[in-house]
Amino acid sequence: MSFISIENVSFSYDEENPAASKAVDGVSMEIEAGEFVAVIGHNGCGKSTLAKHLNAMLLPDSGRVVVDGDDTAEEEKTFDIREKVGLVLQNPDNQLVASIVEEDVAFGPENLGVPPEEIRQRVDEALKAVDMYDYREHAPYKLSGGQKQRVAIAGILAIRPQCIVLDEPTAMLDPSGREEVISTLLKLNRERKMTVVLITHYMDEAVLADRVVVMDSGKVLTQGTPEEVFAQVELLKKHRLDVPQSAELIYRLRGCGLQIDKIPLTQDDCVALLEEAIK
Amino acid sequence: MVRDVSFGQYFPGKSPMHRLDPRGKLIMFIAFIVIIFCTFNYVSLGITAAFTVLFLVLSQISPKFYFKSLKVIIFIVIFTSLLNLFYGSGEPLWQWGILRITVNGINRAVFVTVRIVCLILAGSCLTFTTSPTELTDAIERLMKPLKVIRFPVHEIAMMMSLALRFVPTLLEETDKIMAAQKARGADMESGNLFKRVKALIPILIPLFVSAFRRAYDVATAMECRCYRGGAGRTRMKQIHLSARDVAAFIVTALTIGGVIVCNIFLKRVL
Amino acid sequence: MSCVLELKNLSFVYGKGTPFEKKAVDNVSLKIEKGEFIGVIGHTGSGKSTLMQMLNGLIRPSSGQVLLDGNDIWAQPKKIRDVRFRVGMVFQYPEYQLFEETVYKDISFGPQNQGKEGEALDKAVRDAADFTGLKPSLLEKSPFDLSGGEKRRAAIAGVIAMDPEVLVLDEPTAGLDPMGREVLLSQIVRYHKERQNTVLLVTHTMEDIARVADRIIVMNKGRPEMFAPTKEIFSRGDELEAFGLRVPQITAIMRQLRDKGIDVPEGVLSVDEAFAALVPLLQKEGKLW
């Protein structure tokens, strides 16, 4: 059985008239342990609402979410689930609750009642994993956006979850901050086999995932490997989603008869394909 | 810019002051506030000033930062000492119109200046060497007995520590909003009092809106990190009394004793 | 063309005389022509935000001058407010400045401070709302009831309504989704075309700036290291990378092909251009219909 299974989940913020405005509308999805899944879509497509379902911050109106065998709707399991699935939010400033980096990272394990020596160990380990150990005694407000977001990730890692869900963690960051956060996530996934669910609207981040899920109006539009998903240039364009420029170029050349099966997602792949076609 | 104040900041370090038990530091600070307003002659004032200096030295923090925190209150100090200087009682030493200087006035000015300066320095020393978490932790533990009467000790301490965490963030935000409104021609520098108060609305409303939004976000983030109130929480940084704290207590006790003895045996100058 | 903004030996030093002294803007001299669309790029901390805030007198230079239509903006410090109406500034996340009861009133804040009233005010507000694509029905709503994208547009309209000769936008598309980014950018382009005003756009999104700017200023360590037409800037990819910046993916692809000896033009900025350049080459090889 998969680590997280989302079974026909619907949710509405409008309590009086839930049928009219569903934020999430009949979504089913499986997330395997160790997988790196990217969820993309416009603002308001329901991807953030879905993210909050994964750690029982929101409970489905209908359908169910099962995390490692536990239904999120079971109240006594709430904190077990939050220990297994950590959620990182968009604004890094609002996630840091203490005035010193290491004290902030300690917040999670302190809530869990972990013994002091072990907290120290977990905090050091988490800070090293995001490469922020040297900043452990700094004040969060003096850090750059990318650094703050990495501290927020460390704060979740210190809880030692099996899965980390990130709700647009790079939306407020500059390019170097984005790169710091994404390479941290890749490292966690590749080296520690951490399950990562990345909610984003940056296509160049989604390209790095094992699997991409595209959402629109609360529903899953399409999903598959990045190659499969971004090959559907027309569908994505119709929903006004970004496509990597390399994919768009090859797609348009194919429309004129160019015989290339593969849709390239990276610069190097694209150059190699074109070079072969022209020489 | 509002951010340039060093008062209330924390400088991580390993000095003797940093290593004192925050509960002890807090009690000593409160005792210090009481004692400094019980100094009535120059010897006792000297003792408390020496006590302050001793702790500043032990904090191993550059005097530059202490000067910076004094800079903020320099006007209050000058203003109150002038007020005291000219409104003393007794025989005037010098008089010009309604301004007159008396021995009593000079004494009062000196005392008020030294008291305020010592108070700010001691307060800075406390916050410079104690992280907000330690401080609120100390408050939480000291107030623990109040739990018996259902006083929400943990909640108050948590609120304080969050407030301290967000002070710099909100100050920065105030700067940004002010700049944005000025760019739209908001005039905050001229006009009468009513106009100036009105000019604050475009700043205060966005600030409140953003503070509420942040509060909501922070609550969500805390829940995501398994926060469920004070029950069952542990702490990474343990605090316990050591020989160092005992030594600090003895020094404080000696200072208090010295001030009391001076007050009994020496003439009051105030 | 005539010069609208001229910077002469402009410098700004933070925390002068303290141990934290830092030169944010370092002896900048440059000229911006009337009606130009200028892109400003540079990594965080390169001094671009400080430089922008000096253009409308929010930050007073430590030394040097900002000339607006040939006049030093600090000649009469008491009149600096007038400069702010002429050089409009949209900050990052401008929606955080909204405060009025209705969107209409909020957009009026700037022009009202300017002294506009009656019909002129009404026209300024409605035109600005139109430029940013806000539906008239939204004007009577509370700004706090709008969606994120609408709030952003209302806030930008609040600056456009002052009808500034120069409009400075600091990352207006930050945090928006691709569709929101696209729409807002095209509205800015339309505004620039119709009003024929000067626009300065600060951004991190190279794909966007490559499509819209006439010339680009590249800031690094407080200095404008490059200031040249867009095509030229992006054909110097190696230099950009040295400043911690990158070129759009399509530009990099075409550059790599060129390096491999394939005859494609330099400084390709969009998929359209790349497509147009590749079709004849592929046709020659008989790879297309």
Image: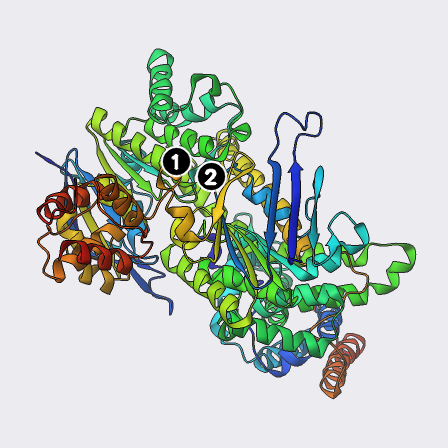
Please rate how many residues cluster around mark 2, counting C-alpha atoms within 10 Å: few if below 14, some from 14 to 19, many from 20. many
Please tell me whether mark 2 or mark 1 is closer to you in this view: 1
Q: Position of residue B199 (x, y in %)?
A: 48, 32
The numbered mark 2 sits on a residue in which chain?
A
Q: Position of residue A223 (x, y in %)?
A: 49, 46
B142 above or below A55? below
Image quarter where the C terminus of chain C lies is top left
Mark number displayed over residue A9? none
Mark number displayed over residue A42? 2
In the image, taking residue B68 as reference, residue B10 lies left or right, namely right
* Quarter of the image where one finds residue B9: bottom right
Mark number displayed over residue A240? 1
Q: Position of residue A86 (x, y in %)?
A: 63, 58
Mark 2 vs mark 1, CA separation in Å: 9 Å
C17 above or below B223? below
Please say whether residue B235 is visible from this viewpoint.
yes
Please rate how many residues cluster around mark 1, counting C-alpha atoms within 10 Å: few if below 14, some from 14 to 19, many from 20. some
Mark 2 and mark 1 residues within 8 Å of each other at the beta carbon = yes
* Quarter of the image where one finds residue C235: bottom left
Q: Nearer the viewer, residue B67 or C197?
A: C197
Three-letter code for the amino acid on which mark 1 is drawn:
Arg
Residue occupying image coordinates x 72% and y 76%:
A116
Q: Position of residue C260 (x, y in %)?
A: 13, 62
The numbered mark 1 sits on a residue in which chain?
A
Q: Are marks 2 and 1 on the same chain?
A: yes
Residue occupying image coordinates x 33% and y 38%:
C89
Q: Earlier in the sequence, mark 2 or mark 1?
A: 2
Three-letter code for the amino acid on which mark 2 is drawn:
His
Q: How is the image coloured?
A: rainbow
Q: Nearer the viewer, residue B10 or A215?
A: A215
